[in-house]
Image (spheres, rainbow, N blue to C red):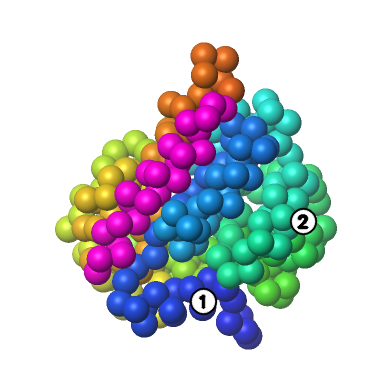
Amino acid sequence: MTHSTRIDKTFASLKAKGRSALVTFITAGDPDLETSKKILDGLPAAGADVIELGMPFSDPMADGPAIQASSLRALNAGQCMKKTLAMVAEFRKRNPDTPIVLMGYYNPIYVYPAGKFLDDAVKAGVDGLIVVDVPPEADDELCLPARDRGLNFIRLATPTTDDKRLPAVLTNTSGFLYYVSITGITGAAAPEVNSVHSQIARIKKATKLPVAVGFGVKTPEQVGALAKGADGVVVGSALVTAIKESLDADGRATGKTVPAVLDLVKCLSAPLRTV
């Protein structure tokens, strides 16, 4: 990247303050478009430093039951890629600083199609992409065109990403590296803190990129512990579960839905604010 992005600036600013970032994930359009917009708008004030916005997809293979269900709720409510990008554009009018990363799978981007998606994402104010099923071997397909448009392309490293594979993962990655703290799907298990810290230390020997850790993070205590070795902590399944548990018997949003998510974010961000 030839210029500093919102993601770069955010991580640099937080590093100067001596604390890690809270990265929050919600699925666009979950449980409906208007409620999702309210949650998105409220996340920065609640303590989110970076926002991952899920692009709903019918077959989210890396995600556990909670995020799979959130995608289904969004799709059933009529969410599509154009509405997701419009959400970002509306948010960006009110919030010029908080980075937004679109996270998901390549299929909805491919059918958009990809070139137009990238152009529209830039126009909407998107800062980066996490597309979990596009490997480094296919960088020409999406990663390099995204980079050429000024978007960060963020990759995932896992406990099975050894020193032989790591250079390929890091090539062309920008913004930050997302370290998957467990072997498995999102929300499946709790991360083992000491092991995560050891893996992050290994990764940091190979890159100057910030490293954010996610998968299985649910409590303020986990956030605080993981932040001691990471530049950011990602929480997703816990937030979409809070949405699910706030819905009425017919699966519709209630007056509790938005506060349930934002209050949880406040709790999760608290350990980072006291560092």
Residue most toward the front? 255
x then y, percent, for residue 209: 43, 75
Left/right of residue 241 with respect to residue 162 in the rendered view: right
Q: Is residue 133 above or below residue 177?
A: above
Q: Which mark is residue 117?
A: 2
Residue at figure coordinates x 61%, y 37% from the top left: 35
Q: What amino acid is labelled 2 in the image?
A: Phe
Residue span colored magenta: 253-275
Residue most toward the left? 194
Q: Secondary structure at mark 1?
A: helix
Left/right of residue 18 with respect to residue 53 in the rendered view: left
Q: Is residue 262 visible?
A: yes
Please name the residue that numbered disc 1 is placed on. 8
Magenta part mainly helix, strand or loop? helix
Q: Which mark is residue 245?
A: none
Q: CA distance from mark 1 to mark 2?
A: 22 Å
Residue at figure coordinates x 77%, y 65% from the top left: 123
Q: Is residue 272 above or below residue 217?
A: below
x then y, percent, for residue 137: 59, 62
The quadrant of the picture occupied by the C terminus is bottom left
Q: Find residue 229 and report its image quarter.
A: bottom left
Q: Is residue 41 above or below residue 4?
A: above
